[in-house]
Image (cartoon, grey):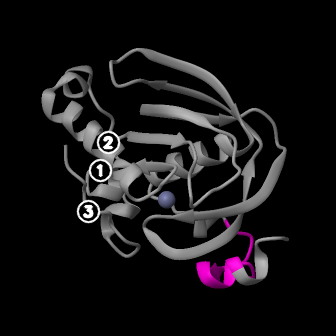
């Protein structure tokens, strides 16, 4: 396994719509190795999610996991999930604002409105169909990664930039609000 280099905002690959994977492409040893590397990279960077274009591959693959994460303490846990060719649709118009950060936009946090619950259709890494509902922080992480796969970042979703803050100032001024 290998830890991959994470693209930062400004790299054109982050603004491209990623490509669907065919079943044979998903099954290939190269793709399976790449998924292992994505998982290792996400863990090494203390991320709760990672999209393939964040590691220079314009493909419809995202990985997510929320465990005891120093970047996001006290968040509900989400098991390790691999989403291939995902389709994400909101279950209602209800939205909620909360803090997000991004490994491709280091050192910053901002408040982002997201749908509270979403329906997810995707394939897992074995090509099996996934069909589930995600709510709250789980739904937020999925919307963040789904946006990446469609060339968007969380800054695009912010209502305005008044909450945009560096991590040091976040800890100092915002952590309790
Ligand atoms: Zn991100």
Q: Distance between the residues labelled 2 and 3?
A: 20 Å
x, y (%) of residue 93?
A: 82, 43
Q: Does the stretch in magenta take in 165? A: yes
Q: Which of 105 and 148 is in front in this view?
A: 105
The residue lying at 40 percent from left, 59 percent from top is 45
Q: Which of 159 and 40 is in front in this view?
A: 40
Q: Can residue 17 be seen in this view?
A: no
Q: Mark 1 points at which residue?
A: 58
User: Which residues fall within the magenta stretch?
Assistant: 158-171
Q: How far apart are marks 1 and 3 (CA)?
A: 14 Å
Q: Choose mark 1 or mark 3, whichever is in front.
A: 3
Q: Does the stretch in magenta take in 66? A: no
Left or right placement of residue 151 versus residue 119 in this view: left
| Disc 2 to disc 1: CB gap under 8 Å | yes
The residue lying at 61 percent from left, 83 percent from top is 168
Give neighbour class at mark 1: few <14, some 14-19, many 20+ (Cα, 10 Å): many
x, y (%) of residue 58?
A: 29, 50
Q: Name the residue under label 2.
A: 19
Of marks 2 and 1, which one's residue comes earlier in the chain? 2
Secondary structure of the residue carrying tag 3 is loop
- Res. 128 image quadrant: top left
Q: Name the residue under label 3.
A: 5
Q: Nearer the viewer, residue 117 or 78?
A: 78
């Amino acid at each position: 396994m290998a830890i991959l280099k994470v693209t930062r905002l400004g790299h054109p690959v982050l603004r491209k719509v990623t490509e669907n994977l065919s079943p044979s492409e998903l099954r290939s040893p190269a793709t399976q190795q790449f998924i292992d590397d994505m998982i290792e990279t996400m863990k090494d960077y203390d991320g709760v999610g990672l999209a393939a274009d964040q590691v220079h591959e314009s493909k419809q693959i995202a990985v997510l996991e929320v465990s005891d994460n120093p970047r996001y303490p006290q968040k509900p846990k989400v098991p390790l999930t691999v989403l291939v060719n995902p389709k994400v649709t909101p279950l209602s118009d209800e939205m909620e604002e909360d803090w997000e950060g991004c490994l491709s936009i280091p050192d910053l946090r901002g408040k982002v409105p997201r749908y509270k619950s979403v329906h997810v259709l995707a394939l897992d890494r074995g090509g099996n169909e996934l069909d589930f509902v995600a709510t709250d922080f789980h739904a937020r992480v999925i919307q963040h990664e789904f946006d990446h796969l469609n060339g968007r970042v969380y800054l695009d979703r912010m209502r305005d930039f008044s909450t945009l803050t560096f991590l040091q100032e976040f800890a100092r001024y915002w952590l309790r609000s």
